[in-house]
Image (cartoon, grey):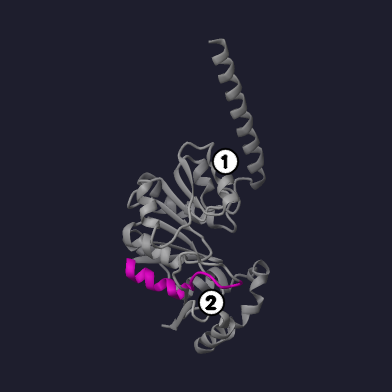
Amino acid sequence: MKKRRLNQFIKGTIQRLEFAWHRARISKYRGTFSNFDEQTIIEKYVDLFRIRDQNQTVVDIGAGDGVRSSNTFALVQDGWNVLGVEYDSRKASLLAQNYSFYPGSRACRFLVTSTNIVDLLNAYSVEKDFALLSLDIDGCDYWVLDAILSEFRPKLVVSEFNEKIPPPVKFVVNDVPEFSLRHHFFGYSVSKLGDLLEKHDYVMLEIEFNNVVIAPAEIASENSVGIEEAYSKGYLNRPDRKEKFRANANMEPLQSMDPQQCVDFLHNFYAEYQDEYQIELR
């Protein structure tokens, strides 16, 4: 009996020390974890659409370590039910460690594709109308998003897009199981997202640099904005854009070209990937 109590005491002490270390490590973020202002934007729409009162399930695909540059960690801390999915083994290990202190959070190491994501969410019993989807896999995000919205109806979606390609150019990488991220070659353009908005009856709310924020039309139509307006306000005309996205300098000419010139530029820029993407004008 004494030995059992001693073991429980030691285990409890170790857990308290681990949690104290975790708290100390994340304190440097001062409660703000997202890369830009996505966390605040999410909080705004959670309140505006009263999502918290309806559902508190979050799916974070491409969750990284769950803390650094996370759109969802503030909700993890707030006790929401969060499924974090990450394929990189090192990040997935850190994700599991960071989530271990929060009973409502589950970490999953998994290579997400458009053909397996629905089965994964069903395996974790994710509700059809779950609260928030955060998607950032630097690859076939468009096709994964399409697959999710075909079976689920998250009340709010934050998804990374290829911010360098302006409207009205529709660009998307092909849907392949193991996409390889290359310099500026990934994802989809904001105008291509328009196809999914129309197909699934979602609306654009805003853009925060390289992330789109969308929601179902039935709850957000009064707050919707046009794609070009969102792009101009949320990316193109931001005064600090070039400073924050210095790596985009070699694609900056796109912003002063007419649509056909943009297409020609991209075909030339992506010449070595000519069979790996689709591009068109509206």
Query: Marks 2/1: CA distance?
Result: 37 Å
Left or right, 160 with reference to 19: left
Task: Identify the mark at residue 277; answer none if there is no mark.
Answer: none
Compared to residue 139, the image places residue 117 above or below, namely above
Question: How many residues crowd mark 1 within 10 Å: few (<14), some (14–19), many (20+)?
Answer: some
Compared to residue 254, the image places residue 121 above or below, namely above
Q: Nearer the viewer, residue 249 or 13?
A: 13
Q: Horizontal and vertical percent for residue 264? A: 54, 88
- The residue beneath circle 1 is 97
Q: Nearer the viewer, residue 266 or 28?
A: 266
Q: Horizontal and vertical percent for residue 53? A: 37, 44
- The residue beneath circle 2 is 165
Left or right, 255 with reference to 216: right
Which residue sits at x=53%, y=46%? 74
Compared to residue 131, the image places residue 182 above or below, namely below
Residue 198 lies in magenta, yes or no? Answer: yes
Residue 247 visible here = yes
Q: Horizontal and vertical percent for residue 76? A: 50, 43
| Three-letter code for the amino acid on which mark 1 is drawn | Gln
Looking at the image, which residue sits at the far top? 1
| Residue extent of the magenta highlight | 183-200
Q: Horizontal and vertical percent for residue 182? A: 59, 70
Tell me which numbered mark, 2 or 1, is placed earlier along the sequence: 1
Q: Nearer the viewer, residue 14 or 262?
A: 14
Which residue sits at x=58%, y=49%? 65
SS of the residue under disc 1: helix
Compared to residue 179, the image places residue 89 above or below, namely above
Question: How many residues crowd mark 2 within 10 Å: few (<14), some (14–19), many (20+)?
Answer: many
Residue 126 visible here = no
Quadrant of the drawing holding the C terminus: bottom left
Residue 242 placement: quadrant:
bottom right
